[in-house]
Amino acid sequence: MRRAASSRAVKRATVLVGIGLAVWLTLPASAAACSGGPLLTGMPGNPKTYEEAAEVIFTGTAVRAESQMPFYGGSSLDPLLFTFVVDSVEKGRVGDRFTIATTHDGAACGYAFELGQRYRVLAWGGDGVLAAGHLWVYSANGTQRVDPLAAPPPIEGTIAPLTPMLGSILVLALPVLLVGSFAYFFWRYRPRPYA
């Protein structure tokens, strides 16, 4: 009798741990709101405006987007690369085509570029780990949409990882598999009345 009671206690503890783990895995991560682009204070040269601080300023049409989010889902901080066909340059060295990086999400300070639209873009030095040397654009740094050209360049489209949904499916399926496994375990090894 004592063995059955301790077996039930272990099973109950295992169920509670499993349910707790499943709930913890499905809770969303905390989000941080974006307060704009890089702060001007502390930047080299003490710039007074974002125009002074930007490494490049150009006007161009967004023609291509490339997601750098890994196949398993990634995060909103993963870079989203936009390629522009440049029609004028105000500052810095910019060619006929220029690629910048931003984040996937406005809460992570990403700029919501739309393909086919023309923008005046202000960009800063990139984080080599996240965007492999591309300059960054932030949501509140002076980048803005401007009037389109009379004959805009053709849109090239969006390039995304081959299996972006695989990670999301795995993340959603994991708690279901855990709970199902615990349920099967307890059903299979449930105490049976002695005959």
Image (cartoon, rainbow, N blue to C red):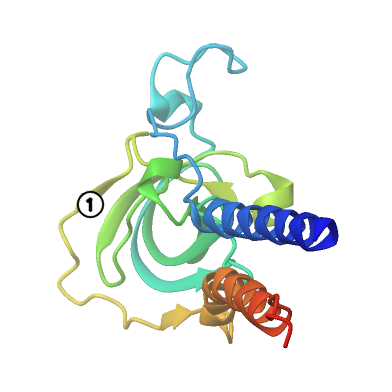
The image shows residue 116, relative to residue 154, as above or below, that is above
Q: Quadrant of the N terminus?
A: bottom right
Look at 47% across and 50% down and name the residue there.
Answer: 28
User: Which residue bears the numbered disc 1?
Assistant: 145
The image shows residue 53, relative to residue 128, as above or below, that is above
Q: Residue 25 falls in which quadrant of the image? A: bottom right
The image shows residue 3, relative to residue 37, as above or below, that is below
Task: Looking at this view, name the residue that lies furthest to the right.
Answer: 3
Front one among 192 and 47: 192
Q: Local crowd at mark 1 within 10 Å, few (<14), some, or many (≥20)? A: some
Look at 37% across and 34% down and name the residue there.
Answer: 141
Front one among 153 and 158: 158
Counting from the top left corner in percent of width and height, residue 129 is at 73, 50
Look at 71% across and 62% down and name the residue there.
Answer: 11
Disc 1 marks which amino acid?
A: Arg
Counting from the top left corner in percent of width and height, residue 151 is at 20, 77
Q: Residue 107 falls in which quadrant of the image? A: top left
Look at 58% across and 12% down and name the residue there.
Answer: 42
For residue 87, side relative to residue 92 (left or right): left
Front one among 37 and 89: 37
Question: Is any atom of residue 94 visible in this view?
Answer: no
- Label total for image: 1
Counting from the top left corner in percent of width and height, residue 111 is at 37, 49
Q: Quadrant of the C terminus?
A: bottom right
Task: Looking at this view, name the residue that lies furthest to the front.
Answer: 195
Question: Is any atom of residue 106 visible in this view?
Answer: yes
Front one among 142 and 173: 173
Counting from the top left corner in percent of width and height, residue 91 is at 46, 40
For residue 119, side relative to residue 63 (left or right): left
Q: Circle 1 — which element?
A: strand
